[in-house]
Image (cartoon, grey):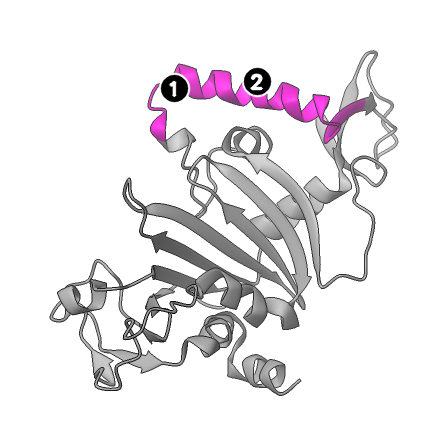
Amino acid sequence: MSMARSEGVGAAATTSATVRELLDLTDEELLAVDGPDQGVVSLPYLDRIDEEDAREMARSTALRVLFARGLLRFSRAAVDAAGRAPAPGERTVEVAADLADILAIRRAPEGLLAAQRLAGAPSGPEALMRYVHRSGDLVLIEDVSSSGIHRFATAEIEALPELMQTFLQAAPDPTPGAAGEDSSWPPEVVPHRDGAALLAGVHIIAEIVVRLDDTPVSHTHTAYVYPHGAYLGPAPLSDPRAARLARRDPAGLGEWAAALLTGPQRGRRESSA
């Protein structure tokens, strides 16, 4: 059984909007169409299932759901490139255009930015991941919830600073004397030394991993974000020897994050537009 791209199944209408929403897919559906190796992309729901039989059942069920949603469909096999006629009963699987585009970009991106946001909640930290897969002047945005729902959209690369700004920025805090208003905050900090002070009043902690296609090396960055300030830099949360983080204006978070993937020239052009 082979797979082919289908232009007419599930393709979203083209709009003039900067961001084009595509599909929502579950961990199980991605497992069904793209196998167990998802690279750096997290599968938070499936990660809680240890039994191989249960994972296989989830994959089989998700495959049925993909057919029910019209994202996959059977069609009669055509004569192949070598002129071979299909065997009796042989069928091929057509993949909806949006799903085919998602899989193509995810499998071979020119660069990947993986951002994990930790926001305080009464029951504990709630993780939200955003993966940005670059393909030329287009980016595929993949937002992953802690329940294993992957929401996909595409955008022109010029929109990336704004998209990352909305992902990283903290809500304004109108409380007088709120964290970040104090001008005595040091211009830089060392996370493992100043951890307690960093956590006081923090709204968002984000760890960002960037991998470009011309190097196998991943670079990790950290952001501590407050309503009126932020500390950013190349410091993994888990590294006790973390480098110093510099205080930055939170209004520039998106441009900073986008430049990690696209380079500073792109960020400067966006800011001057």
Most distant residue in the left direction? 193
Q: Locate residue 10: give its quadrant.
A: top right
Residue 5 location in percent, x, y? Answer: 77, 39
Secondary structure category for the residue under label 2: helix
Quadrant housing the N terminus = top right
Q: What residue type is disc 2 on?
A: Thr
Residue drawn at the location 30% of the way across and 76% of the way down: 180
Front label number (1 vs 2): 2
Is 177 placed above or below 209 here? below
Looking at the rendering, the stretch of residues picked out in magenta corresponds to 48-74
**What element does badge 1 sit on?**
helix
Name above or below for residue 273 compared with residue 139. Answer: below
Q: Which mark is residue 42?
A: none
The residue pinned by badge 1 equals 52
Identify the residue shown where x is 84% and y is 32%: 80
Q: What residue did someone put label 2 on? A: 61
- Residue 64: give x, y in percent of width and height: 64, 19
Crowding near the residue tagged with mark 1, few <14, some 14–19, many ≥20 C-alpha atoms within 10 Å: few
Left or right of residue 197: residue 140: right
- Residue 15: x and y in percent read 81, 56
Residue for point 35% across, 45% down: 126
Residue 145 showing in the rendered view: yes
How many residues crowd mark 2 within 10 Å: few (<14), some (14–19), many (20+)? some
State the image quarter where residue 205 is shown: bottom left
* 61 in the magenta segment: yes
Q: Position of residue 133 (x, y in %)?
A: 56, 57
C-alpha separation, residue under disc 1 versus residue under disc 2: 14 Å
Q: Quadrant location of the C terminus?
A: bottom right
